[in-house]
Image: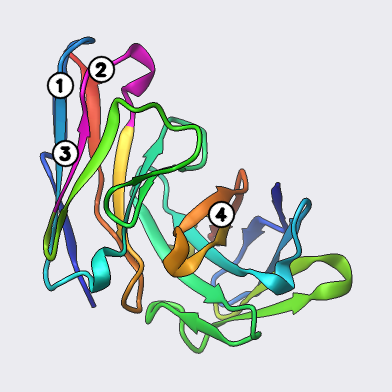
C-alpha cells in the first residue's frame, strides 16, 4: 500500500503567517489523485483540495495545493484564526486508499 | 447530507451493523466510503462501495466487514463481524466522487466501542 508521511507532525504559527504542510508518498500517486482535508475537534473532516491542486467549492483562496508524483504541499497563504486544526492528506488513486497521519496546526 | 447510525458498545467477537442514510443524492449513483478514527488518532480508510455494487476493503477489516446497499432506503450498511478492541472508533461515511474529487460530503459519524 502507499504510505503517506506528513510533516511536520505539529506546526506552531501565528495568525497572518504562511503555513506549508508536506505530504510525501512511498510511491507515485496515480495521476496526482491526492486530496487534503481539514478536521476540527468533534467535527468530521472537510475536503479542501482534490487532484493535488484543485480547490473544493467554498474553500477560501488562501488554501492552495501543489506537487506531483511523491511530494505534495498544502499552503495556507495567510493564516486566519479558524485555520488552526488538523490537516490530512489522502491518496485515492491506488487501493487501499490511504491517509497520512496528520499535521496539527496550532496557534503559537 | 449523510447520517450514520447503529453505533454502540459491543463485546469482542460480537457484531454490529452501521447504516449511512443519504439525502439530496442517490447512493446507487455514487460511491460511498467508510472511514474510521480511533480515539485521539488519525483517519483510516475502511471500505468503499461503488455504484456498481462492488466493494473493496482495507486488509484490517477484510473477511470481517461487508457492505450492502438498500436502494429503497437510500442507505448503505456496513456489517461488522468478529469485532476486536482495535475496531473501536468513530465511523464516518462519505460520498466518494472517486477520481473526480475524493470525499466531498461527510456524515457526523457514529461511535463504535468494542470492549468487555
Proximity of marks 4 and 2: CB atoms separated by less than 8 Å: no
On the image, numbered disc 2 is attached to which residue? A79
Q: Is residue A76 magenta?
A: yes
Q: Residue at 14% of width from left, 33% of height from top?
A: A20
- Residue B97 location (% of width, % of height): 52, 63
- Say if A57 sits above or below B44 in the image: above
On the image, numbered disc 1 is attached to which residue? A18
On the image, numbered disc 3 is attached to which residue? A21
Q: Is residue B90 left or right of residue A11?
A: right
Q: Is residue B4 left or right of residue A30?
A: right
Helix, strand or loop at disc 4?
Answer: strand
Q: Are marks 3 and 2 on the same chain?
A: yes
Mark found first going from the N terminus, 3 or 2: 3
**Front residue of this view, candidates A59 and A108:** A59
On the image, numbered disc 4 is attached to which residue? B92
Q: Residue at 34% of width from left, 12% of height from top?
A: A81
Helix, strand or loop at disc 1?
Answer: loop
Highlighted range, magenta: A72-85
Proximity of marks 1 and 3: CB atoms separated by less than 8 Å: no
Amino acid at each position: 500500500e502507499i504510505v503517506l508521511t506528513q510533516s511536520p507532525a505539529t506546526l506552531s504559527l501565528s495568525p497572518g503567517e504562511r503555513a506549508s504542510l508536506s505530504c510525501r508518498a512511498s510511491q507515485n500517486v496515480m495521476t496526482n489523485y491526492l486530496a487534503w482535508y481539514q478536521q476540527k475537534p468533534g467535527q468530521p473532516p472537510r475536503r479542501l483540495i482534490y487532484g493535488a491542486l484543485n480547490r473544493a467549492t467554498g474553500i477560501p483562496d488562501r488554501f492552495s495545493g501543489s506537487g506531483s508524483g511523491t511530494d505534495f504541499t498544502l499552503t495556507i497563504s495567510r493564516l486566519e484564526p479558524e485555520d488552526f486544526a488538523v490537516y490530512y492528506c489522502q491518496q485515492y488513486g491506488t487501493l487501499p486508499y490511504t491517509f497520512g497521519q496528520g499535521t496539527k496546526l496550532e496557534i503559537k | 447530507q449523510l447520517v450514520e447510525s447503529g453505533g454502540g458498545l459491543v463485546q469482542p467477537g460480537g457484531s454490529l451493523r452501521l447504516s449511512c442514510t443519504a439525502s439530496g443524492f442517490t447512493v446507487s449513483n455514487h460511491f460511498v466510503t467508510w472511514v474510521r478514527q480511533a480515539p485521539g488518532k488519525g483517519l483510516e480508510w475502511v471500505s468503499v462501495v461503488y455504484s456498481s455494487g462492488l466493494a473493496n476493503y482495507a486488509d484490517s477489516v477484510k473477511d470481517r466487514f461487508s457492505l450492502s446497499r438498500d436502494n429503497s432506503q437510500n442507505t448503505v450498511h456496513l456489517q461488522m463481524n468478529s469485532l476486536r478492541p482495535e475496531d473501536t472508533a468513530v465511523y464516518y461515511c462519505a460520498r466518494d466522487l472517486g477520481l473526480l474529487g475524493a470525499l466531498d460530503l461527510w456524515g457526523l459519524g457514529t461511535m463504535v466501542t468494542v470492549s468487555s
